[in-house]
Amino acid sequence: MPSDTFSFVVARWGLLLVTLASLGAIFLRAQSDDILSIDLVHLLPSSDRSPDIVLVVKERREQFERRLLILAGAEEAEQAFAAAKVVVQTLEGVPQLSVRSLSSAPAGRDIYSFYAQHRHGLLDVDMARLLRRGDAVEISTLVARRYADPSTLLNSALIKSDPLLLLPAFLDHGFSTSSENMRFKDGSPFFEEGGWAYVPVSFDLAGSPFSIDVQRGVTAALADAIRVLREKMPEAVILSAGVVRHAANGTQTAEAEISTVGLGSLVGVVLLVLFVFRSSLPLGASILSIGVGGIAGFTACLFVFGNVHLLTLVFGGSLVGISVDYVFHYFCERARRDEEVSGEEARARVFAGITLGLVTTLIGFIGMWIAPFPGLRQMALFSGVGLVGSYLMVCLWFPVLSQGLRPIASGPADAVQRYLIFWQKLPRSAVAVTAAGVGLLALVGVAVLEPQDDVRLFQSLDGELLAEQQQIETALDERTVSQFFLVEGRSSEELLQRVEMLSAGLTEAAGEEGMTLSSLLPSIARQQENRALLVSYLEADGTIEVLQSLVGLQPKVLDDYVNSLKAAPASLGLQEWLADPVSSPYRQLYLGEREGAHRAVVTLARVLDREALERLASENPGVAFIDTAGTYSRLFSLYREQVSILALFSYVLVTALLLWRYGVTGTLAIMAAPIFAAFVSFGVLGLVWGTYSLFNVMALILVLGISVDYGIFFREAGPDSATTLMAVVLSALTTILAFGLLAFSSTAAIQAFGVTIFVGIVVSLLVSPIAGVSLRGRG
């Protein structure tokens, strides 16, 4: 390879200019736009998601994420309200928080007065069902039971205006979703649980709960509120829940892991490089190579996709594991102890190996690029372009930057030489027996492996925070359920009719109506139908006589009631309902009107069968079923299956290329390491954890790229290259320090990634010399 040609000089400085320009472009984009994405929905194929659904889900998620709920508790309600006021006064000046509401709800008399104006069209579910069936006997019996119910507060005015007691029954049903723990004091609600009274206070965050400033501000404010309350009212307690608390805890955990695992990795790599090369030059060159690759990959993703997902950055960390192969292979050749090698000669010697290693790795990423998943394509683009950038950095700049490099230290060189001699003298029978034993043990683990696609793999949740959240849910008698229905209509009336249809189907399919607008606000068509059904029932022969006999209703009262029904009083409409305070606790069910479409949600009190709910949504026009946690888990499942297939495809493509270069014998020698490493890695997962996830499969693609590089380097160097073994050992140890220590992370997904890489790279390091010493010759 020529070293001083004009084209080389142009290419070298061209790479520098392109890198600087890319860095500037990233900086400018970051000033005007969000270049990082954390929304897993963005990883879905575009054909699988509706922009309207994505927007609504995003808005609801952001509203939920920006909510902080605090419960002030004491043994007496009066003390709990006093504690709540102390909390509000303490937190009022916090810039990251704004008080949404001190617990409030419309009083029962206000609710009754509002709905009484429209009572003629309001029916509870039981009465409506009997009226539609036309079962006069059952209807009269139901009315009689309600008159006999001791909880019914009867008076002459009620009997005259509502002789069938329809409005109390409607209100009992419509507001039955309120917490059984709710009580009132002077018209203000509080909650009783376990002998304690709790007053809830809602706050809105001024920014994203994932903002470090917001997390620190809220954490400090809560600590201050607890301190002040203890000083003023030591008998009171504060409970709090919100995404910001889990996010703050996650940040603290990440910082702790960075300061321990991350710092340990960095120190280990630095000491390793200094021990072997007795110079910081290879370390600086490694950082430059990885940096150039990272900038190249990031810029390519910005240009093609508009942003970069955080999951892409996690997978893109493969740049560290693979690009250091090129770096250490070059520097081990450059700093040989047995001869003086110039930068250009070192590049020439390693050029074939690192070029073929790059090509095989890029082939591995081709399978991910052709997949119909934006997330996989982005990962492939970032890693592929990034590796090309690192490769060019090694080829174009390292001969210039490696001047004055000292030979490798004698201690590491002698140790590697002894290990190589050990491999050369090791009987093949011993290798076969050991491999067979390890393989059989791994087979047992693989046989018990089961997929794990739970979205909680992404989370590192603190047990104390979860216990506090559970205590709040118990006090409020509420549960956080990620499943809900999104209903859409061209008008508010069509929206309400579709909600009614969905509610009826939900009751039939799952035995629960859910929290719906229809239970609080029937459609105008339903109200008119209810009036017609009542008139038909009351005017039927014998009805008045039966009611008079059962409950003593006078014919004149019933005649006057029928006349009022026929007078067609105004029905209750959505806008009137929204404008009255009675709707305040339930307005979040209506999402408003946008671009001619009215939308509402139907929430669930418990997690139900996903397939049944999806089927129900498909049977109702304008209805979509949303299962946030389930969608993410299903996304992980789809990705896991797709990546598994693509990983196998990548192994096949790489094998085909190696067959062309090395023939059958050489290819078997090279592929022994990655295949055996992948098998043992999954075997360890099965024996220790019993499950595997998307992150384990992603790690296997990285193990493939690194292990194949090891085999190619040995094959190109032949059976007697201690220099190649030194480069492989350094690369493997660096990868283990950079990624293997992630196995100690408290986040399951990161831990899975780290465990797979650790086992895979260790096995590859032990097995890869077979490519150079156990099988001779090339194809």
Image: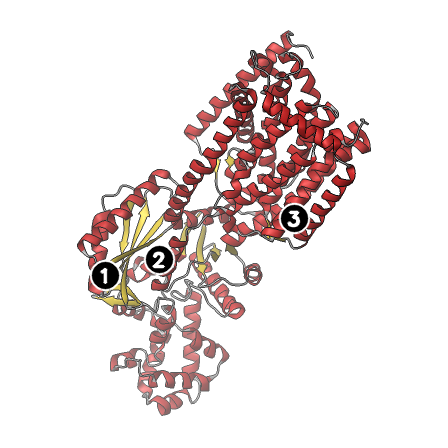
**Between marks 3 and 2, how big is the CA–CA gap?**
62 Å
Residue under the image location 36 percent in, 92 percent down: 549
Going by the numbered disc 3, the residue's amino acid type is: Gly
Image position, residue 209 (x, y; %): 38, 44
What label sits on residue 162 in the rendered view? none
Residue 653 position (above or below residue 539): above
Res 537 quadrant in image: bottom left
Disc with the residue nearer the chain's start (1 vs 3): 1
Q: Is residue 240 left or right of residue 435?
A: left
Residue visible at 21% across and 53% down?
A: 229
Q: Which comes sooner in the sequence, label 3 or label 2?
A: 2
Q: Please name the residue shown 38% across and 44% down the image.
A: 248
Instruction: Say which quadrant the N terminus sits in.
Output: top right
Label 1: few (<14), some or many (≥20) within 10 Å? many
Distance from label 1 to label 3 (Cα)?
A: 56 Å
Within 10 Å of the Cα at label 2, are there few (<14), some (14-19), or many (20+) other Cα atoms?
A: few
Q: Amino acid at mark 2?
A: Gln
Q: Which mark is residue 683?
A: 3
Relative placement, left or right, of 207 versus 383 is: left
Label 2 element class:
helix
Find residue 312 and report its horizontal and vertical position in percent.
Answer: 54, 37
The residue pinned by badge 1 equals 80
Q: Is residue 47 among the parts visible in the rendering?
A: no
- Residue 469 visible in the snapshot: yes
Instruction: Tally the numbered discs.
Output: 3
